[in-house]
Image: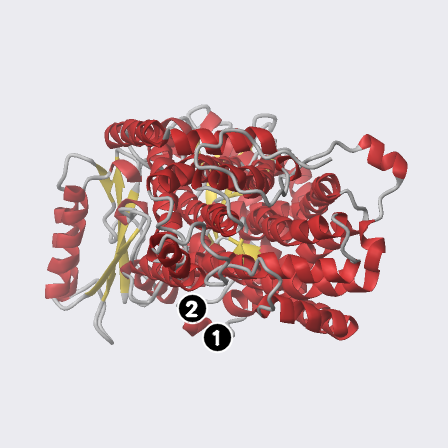
């Protein structure tokens, strides 16, 4: 692979104009296609195999079209303190607002709160529901203007009016001030690392090219594949993070090779053949982990994982082709200032420099000093790292999964205020009613059967009200709503759903009919249960995959096991911090968390997949240099020092860039993206600086030469993967500017 990538890098350098034209053509093609596409679609969240989904499917079958109604908008009216919306000017204002809501070609129906039992018992609150003929992504701005106009008119009459519902969510483009701050922080890290504006700007430029291609492609495929806006944001998040890091590794190796005396073209080829090999391996691990999310059985998770994997693939291709092509246009621009001045003075090839680059002449740098510190105190460093991460992982035991809705939004949003007004006027459970579907096809008297089920559920502790049962046209299936006394994300609501289902056999025997519980609340409860049950198996699969991949790369038994255990430790610590902030509320205000509650159901398993790939990035780039030193004759301890001398600075920069980019997404409104940005930033912090920079060298110091032990029979079976580009050789000879072939390894 190293030889192939060497030729690819050399070809991209020599044919740089052609390479850039090809990428510009790809970018233009997907951009034109995206401009004509419908864009991100409504997310059809489904999970085969759970009761709530089966009941939803039964509704679609027995009530054709009922389960696929259009978007809705809800307008909530609250009378001034001590007054009622049912009398005087308040009622007149509500009536006028309802009349106004009926305007618009997209409106299918508007409910009158005074005729549809949509007024609270104390008369302080009422609501009207607008149903549209189209899905939320197709609701026009003109339709939203009508809703906002009706709300403003009622406010002018003295009422407090808030709006919510799927129709009022106009979505949003990914990106914003927070992400710009993250990019700016990444630029500062690159500038400090390289000491050159060109070297700092090149990874940013190539990452933006890759992200643009990925985002336009996702928008182009969003309609046909049903991709959501969260998929778009996730693609940008990962595309930026890995795109900058992968380009950083290639540029860093290019500078190192130039300092060793290689000509520009040869240095670019060797950089792609060596660092590029590690980039390919790292990218493949991320892609496998993201694509592996499809085994969980959640279509939405599968789509997001595959789209993110596509963005990572584009980032890898850009790093292997666009980076050497740009180096071909400005071969000296990315060098350190000292090296550029030396070339301008005619001093020939630049002398080795330590500016923005690990030392190549054995001088002591910060990485070397840290490695020697760990080697002197491996037990203390190992104990401190494991105990610290273990303590942070403890809150994971109380992890609660769910799907936060409007209650998790900022109190500055009208959706959140509408949610709170309805909860105060109609009770906490009003925002998350349970839908009961009664299948009475086999019952002698379907209506009597539905009545038995309805009465039994209505008498269950925790249910405050049940609606009348509605039958389908055939009269063999009924549906009614049961309103809990607790909020949708309350653990008591989960216990209530389980209680209703546990009581089902006796009720079904008496009614001679079956029933299932669904609705958004039940669906979220079932999704959380399924995801939680998949966490440990997925963690075992991903950890096992890490062991196998690293076994092939490092040809060692103990190094992969250590890497996998470190990955598990960093993930659990990140989940623990996530629970502390988003679920228990510690320091929540610092991160813009308005309402604590359960962790998004998809968050932990998604984070595992992404962190797996990122953790292997740092493992490969750091430990591969240690292995290279060891196989070239250095002692086990000195090999650790050599690995840190060459890689610690660039791995540190890569981790800081990841943290900066991920942290930028904490400012997003979407709960999943906010949590994912926070969780990934924490996971990278723990994995890069505690696991890879502290625990790994401590373990290697304690193991000594045993760390690189591999049974002979296993060595014969395992394929040889040249991640560090040993096939290219490590000769010190100077290559001419027109060199075209790889440097041969000495025999």
Look at the image and tell me whether residue 445 can be seen.
Answer: no
Nearer to the camera, 234 or 88 = 234
Q: Quadrant of the C terminus?
A: top right
Residue 427 position, x and y percent, is: 42, 63
* 586 to 530, vertically: above or below: below
Residue ID for mark 1: 587
Label 2 neighbourhood size at 10 Å, few (<14), some (14-19), many (20+)? some
Under tag 1, what secondary structure? loop
User: Who is closer to the viewer here, 653 or 262?
Assistant: 262
Say which element carries label 2: helix
Residue at x 38%, y 35% (from the top left corner):
218
| Vertical arrangement, residue 45 with respect to residue 75, above or below | above
Which dot marks residue 591?
Answer: 2
Tell me the number on the disc at residue 219: none
| 194 to the left or right of 652 | left
Give percent across and percent down for residue 448. Answer: 55, 36
Q: Are marks 1 and 2 in contact (CB under 8 Å)?
A: yes
Structural distance between the alpha carbons of marks 1 and 2: 7 Å
Q: Quadrant of residue 11?
A: top left
């Amino acid at each position: 692979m190293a030889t192939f990538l060497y030729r690819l890098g050399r070809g991209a350098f020599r044919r740089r104009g052609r390479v850039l034209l090809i990428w510009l053509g790809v970018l233009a093609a997907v951009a034109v296609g995206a401009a004509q596409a419908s864009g991100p679609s409504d997310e059809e969240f489904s999970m085969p195999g759970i009761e709530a989904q089966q009941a939803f499917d039964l509704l679609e079958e027995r009530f054709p079209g009922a389960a696929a109604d259009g978007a809705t908008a809800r307008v909530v009216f609250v009378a001034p303190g001590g007054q009622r919306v049912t009398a005087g000017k308040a009622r007149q204002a509500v009536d006028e607002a309802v009349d106004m809501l009926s305007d618009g070609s997209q409106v299918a129906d508007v409910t009158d709160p005074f005729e549809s039992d949509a007024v609270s018992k104390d008369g302080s609150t009422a609501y009207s529901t607008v149903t549209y003929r189209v899905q939320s992504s197709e609701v026009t701005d003109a339709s939203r203007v009508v809703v906002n106009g009706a709300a403003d008119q009622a406010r002018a009459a003295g009422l407090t009016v808030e709006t919510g519902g799927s129709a009022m969510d106009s979505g949003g483009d990914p990106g914003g001030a927070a992400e710009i701050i993250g990019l700016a922080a990444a630029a500062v890290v690159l500038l400090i690392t390289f000491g050159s504006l060109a070297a700092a700007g090149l990874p940013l430029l190539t990452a933006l090219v890759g992200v643009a291609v990925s985002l336009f492609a996702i928008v182009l495929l969003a309609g046909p594949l049903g991709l959501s806006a969260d998929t778009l944001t996730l693609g940008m998040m990962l595309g930026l993070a890995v795109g900058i890091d992968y380009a950083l590794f290639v540029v860093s190796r290019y500078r190192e090779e130039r300092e060793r005396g290689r000509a520009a073209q040869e240095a670019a080829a060797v950089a792609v053949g060596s660092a590029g090999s590690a980039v390919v391996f790292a990218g493949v691990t991320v892609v496998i982990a993201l694509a592996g999310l499809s085994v969980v059985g959640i279509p939405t998770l599968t789509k997001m994982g595959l789209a993110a994997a596509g963005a990572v693939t584009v980032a890898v291709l850009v790093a292997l082709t666009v980076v050497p092509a740009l180096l071909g246009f400005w071969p000296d621009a990315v060098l350190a200032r000292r090296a550029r001045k030396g070339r301008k003075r005619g001093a020939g090839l630049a002398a080795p420099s330590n500016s923005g680059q690990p030392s190549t002449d054995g001088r002591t740098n910060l990485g070397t000093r840290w490695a020697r510190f760990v080697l002197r105190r491996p037990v203390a460093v190992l104990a401190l790292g494991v105990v610290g991460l273990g303590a942070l992982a403890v809150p994971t035991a109380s992890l609660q999964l769910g799907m936060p809705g409007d209650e998790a939004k900022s109190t500055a949003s009208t959706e959140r205020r509408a949610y709170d007004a309805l909860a105060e006027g109609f009770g906490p459970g009003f925002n998350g009613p349970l839908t009961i579907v009664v299948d009475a096809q086999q019952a002698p008297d379907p209506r009597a059967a539905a009545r038995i089920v309805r009465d039994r559920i209505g008498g269950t502790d925790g249910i405050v009200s049940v609606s009348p049962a509605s039958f389908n046209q055939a009269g063999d299936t009924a549906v009614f709503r049961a309103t809990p006394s607790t909020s949708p994300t309350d653990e008591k609501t989960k216990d209530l759903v389980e209680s209703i289902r546990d009581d089902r056999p006796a009720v079904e025997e008496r009614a001679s009919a079956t029933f299932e519980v669904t609705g958004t609340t039940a669906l979220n409860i079932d999704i959380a249960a399924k995801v939680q049950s998949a966490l440990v198996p997925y963690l075992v699969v991903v950890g096992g995959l890490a062991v196998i991949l690293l076994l092939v790369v490092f040809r060692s038994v103990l190094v992969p096991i250590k890497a996998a255990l470190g990955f598990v430790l960093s993930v659990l610590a990140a989940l623990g911090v996530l629970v502390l902030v988003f679920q228990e509320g510690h320091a929540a205000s610092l991160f813009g968390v308005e309402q604590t509650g359960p962790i998004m159901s998809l968050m932990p398993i998604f984070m595992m997949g992404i962190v797996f790939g990122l953790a292997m990035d740092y493992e490969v780039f750091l430990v591969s240099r240690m292995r290279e030193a060891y196989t070239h004759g250095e002692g086990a301890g000195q090999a650790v020092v050599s690995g840190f001398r060459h890689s610690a600075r660039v791995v540190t920069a890569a981790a800081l860039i990841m943290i900066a980019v991920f942290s930028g997404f904490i400012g997003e409104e979407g709960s999943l993206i906010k949590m994912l940005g926070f969780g990934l930033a924490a996971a990278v912090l723990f994995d890069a600086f505690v696991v890879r920079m502290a625990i790994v060298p401590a373990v290697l110091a304690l193991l000594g030469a045993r760390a690189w032990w591999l049974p002979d029979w296993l060595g014969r079976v395992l394929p040889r993967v040249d991640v560090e580009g040993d096939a290219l050789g490590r000769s010190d000879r100077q290559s001419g500017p027109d060199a075209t072939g790889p440097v041969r390894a000495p025999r």
